[in-house]
Image: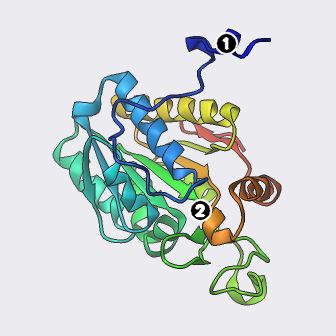
Amino acid sequence: MEVLDIIKPENQVFCKSHLMTDTPLSYCPGCGHGTANNLIMEVIDEMGISEDTIGVAPVGCSVLAYDFMNIDMTQAAHGRAPAVATAIVRTWPEKYVFTYQGDGDLAAIGTAETIHACNRGENIVIFFINNGIYGMTGGQMAPTTLEGMKSSTSPYGREIATMGSPLKITELIANLPGVYSVSRHALHTHKHVRKAKIAIRRAFENTRLKKGLSFIEILSNCNSGWKMTPNDANDWMVENMFPYFPLGDIKVENKLKV
């Protein structure tokens, strides 16, 4: 088949959203954040809700989203994005409000804000980028760091006996009655990108219908923090993170799938 034969609109995986700024991405090359940013903006653009959407991002790699998402954004202190999002959506209940957080932020310093916002069933979307490490601040061990995984604060690998088990916070959140929809995705292949986009669209539709909180975890690599090439980091993610953090729907229409 000629290459030109497959260059058709129906075969396009994704393109740069009109809601992405022209600022060059400053994420590390190979990181999944850029794709995640673009997918969220693509869905918001297609739904025609850009003027009614407000994003909240805290500290960490996620804070860079302000440079690239051409919608109303505000910053929260480290871990406090769900609390800020709660204030926004209660002040303007007609708005589409989302948080964009990393694992160190959401599952460590922000654990309380995350769990209580989810338990209350705030009508927001939470995007959780999980790369199993503190990416921006030096590659320290995070709550989601896998057993045996090396980091700057666990140079010999995470040891369960002294450091505890990796936190499956997404499964924990799914059990809260206020959470309407929960799923986990990845962005390393076109197939996974398309599945993630469907979930993102569904989450914002839940907001439109005031169904409550939608939670989307996105597994990503951190090739800089993991000290790997992007391709090797993707392979490592598939081989090591997917078995512990399996992809797919966890809760749909307020009903647990697993």
Which quarter of the figure is the N terminus placed in?
top right
Observer-nearest of 118 and 157: 157
65 left or right of 228? Answer: left
Q: Looking at the rendering, which quadrant does residue 94 occupy?
A: top left
- How would you rate the neighbour count of disc 1 (Cα within 10 Å): few for under 14, some for 14-19, many for 20 or more? few
The image position of residue 46, as x and y in percent, is 39, 23
Q: Secondary structure at mark 1?
A: helix
Q: Residue at x 49, y 30 (%)?
A: 202
Amino acid type assigned to the residue bearing label 2 in the image: Ile
58, above or below 192, in the image: below
Q: Looking at the rendering, which quadrant does residue 257 occupy?
A: top right
In space, the residues marked 1 and 2 are separated at their CA atoms by 44 Å
Could you tell me if the residues under marks 1 and 2 are in contact, i.e. CB atoms within 8 Å? Answer: no
241, above or below 47, in the image: below
The image position of residue 53, as x and y in percent, is 27, 38
The image position of residue 137, as x and y in percent, is 48, 77
21, above or below 113, in the image: above
Mark number displayed over residue 4: 1
Observer-nearest of 99 and 22: 22
Q: Which badge, 1 or 2, is on the more N-terminal residue?
A: 1
Q: Which residue is mark 2?
A: 169
